[in-house]
Image: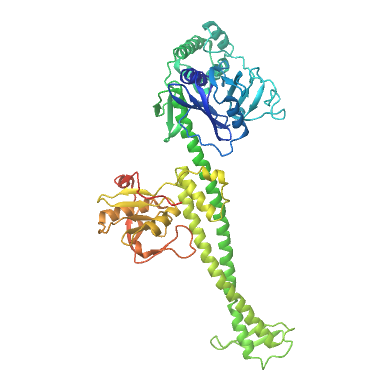
Amino acid sequence: MPFDGFTMRCLALELEKKILNGRIEKIYQPRQDTLIFHINTGSSREKLLISANPSNPRIHLTAESDSSAQHPPMFCMLLRKRLNGGTILSIRQHGMDRVLELAVKTTDQLGEPGLMRIVCEVMGRQSNIILLEQDGRITDSIKRVTGEMSSYRHIFPGIQYKSPPSQSKLDISCAGAADLERAFLQHLGTKAAKAVSGTLEGMGSTLSRELCTRCGIDPDLPLEEASVEALCTAALDLAALLKKEDFSPVIYYSGGKVHDFSPILLTHISLPYERQHSINAMLDSFFRQKTGTEAVSRERDYLLGVVNSFLEKSRKKLVGRLQDLKDAEDKSHFRLYGELVTANLYRLKEKSSIAAVEDYTRPGSPVIEIKLDPTLTPLQNANRFFDEYNRAKRAAKNLEKLIHENREEVEYLEGLIFTIENCETLQDLGEIRQELEKGGYIKPLKAAAKEKRPTPAGPLAYMSRDGFTILVGRNNNQNDYLTLKLARKDDLWLHAKDIPGSHVLVRSGGKEIPDTTLYQAALLAAFHSKARQSSNVPVDYTPAKYVSKPSGAKPGYVIYKNQKTIFVTPAREEMERIKQIKDSGTTAPR
């Protein structure tokens, strides 16, 4: 559900208990549109997150880390100057709107007391964080709004703050039964859910549908007069719940991912849910999961776009070079022409345009005609044919090398796509990004962005039924690390045969590796390959001492010998029998 006014009221009541009279100690700006306030309440230290992100605007207490840039933005520096050391005197919601105002008692550089206000507007694309003087003048904001951007109000330093436009709806926390009835009667014939959201301030679409469901009304059917009394009763019950602060915060999941949140248990949604101990915990958990999932999706889509673009170019280049090679090979007859003309020099006249000669390379030595350049002597024509042949021969040799490199790049990029598609964390994608930077496929990040990169994760680690450690590379850099640096000569190396996938290493510890461990390692190699959905996947295995990397080869590319092949089917029930170890005991390569 969107962060509506009802949720904001529930949050405001909780924040009053948690941070009222708390002292602001530090302020960070980890992202362009997000602030984190460190607040000392005397009994605890809390972190208040306020975000004006257009996709995920919000305000709540958080456990998020708050690393800030070496040079904080100007707005963050202003907040530190004006609010550090200040005490939160009040937390007030503007009616039931999605606007929360924090009044902060401050002291200036001369020791004079003052009052500043932070206004948090949680309104989608129009979300903002605004710092006000005591008289309501705008000191500054995280987003400035000029006349070209909005005709209703401007948000700019020095001008008087103006609240978002009022919607003239009822405040459910103080509306009486008569007021509710009159307002609902004005929406007869409108879809019931829309009648609720059009009557009550701060009621988003999810809660409006819930209110209808609780009184037995279909939210998608027109509101009838006979249903108004039941709707009023449901609204008063919700107001009573708000007054008693009897909340039941929950997060709903769909397909294993966060789907929705609500300050109360919803009866019209039949999805798995997880109860939360507070409104703040609900919002923090929901948005941490949602923004994490969205960030992974954005980064994955970006990297896939980059790699697919280069793959398409590489494939087109390969097709062109294969055609060029065919054309070069088709010119092998120029050598024969040169030889035949040379053998018949004594017979050919100057300025001849045609040479009729016997082709002694074919049975019966048939006479063939060779076109000559009449401006050249017969000998010069012969040399021209030899030159043409030698040029084609050199071109073919060069093209064979380029085609080999081209095919390697196509294979590398196809493997990279498989790896990216199976990355589930920003850590894993960050390693892919670094690999692409080193390969020259994308520009390196700026120094500040590099500092925020998550620490690379180590290889996946499993324990076989026989007690042997099996390591699986998550990406090409880890594959190289496992195979070329970590592996000992008596360890066993595995890889899906001729299929993009991970390098797998069984640590032998000087012992003979049993068949059951070999089988489980082969299952992992098949599962962590492009053939994970296939049956009878061929997996090559050989001692690690027989695996090497050609000079100048792409990341993850190796050659091997003395291999044997095992066929396995990575069925789910088989994979679940292999125990994964949380700590691989290895350091991730950088």
Q: From the viewer's side, name the closer residue of 301 and 344.
A: 301
In the displayed image of the protein, which residue is found farthest to the top? 178
Left or right: where 431 falls relative to 385: left
Image coordinates for residue 568, horizontal then vertical, percent: 32, 54
Whether residue 218 appears in this view of the structure is: no
**Residue appearing at x 39%, y 58% in the figure:** 485
Q: From the viewer's side, name the closer residue of 163 and 589.
A: 589
Whether residue 71 appears in this view of the structure is: yes
Q: Is residue 58 above or below residue 401?
A: above
**Residue appearing at x 37%, y 51% in the figure:** 472
Q: Is residue 66 above or below residue 315?
A: above
The colour scheme of the drawn protein is: rainbow
Image coordinates for residue 9, horizontal then vertical, percent: 51, 18
Q: From the viewer's side, name the closer residue of 202 and 148.
A: 148
Q: Is residue 345 above or below residue 409?
A: below
Image coordinates for residue 110, horizontal then vertical, percent: 62, 22
In the displayed image of the protein, which residue is found farthest to the front? 110
Left or right: where 208 falls relative to 459: right
Image coordinates for residue 581, horizontal then vertical, percent: 32, 45
Left or right: where 154 falls relative to 517: right
The mark tally for this picture is 0
In the displayed image of the protein, which residue is found farthest to the bottom? 346
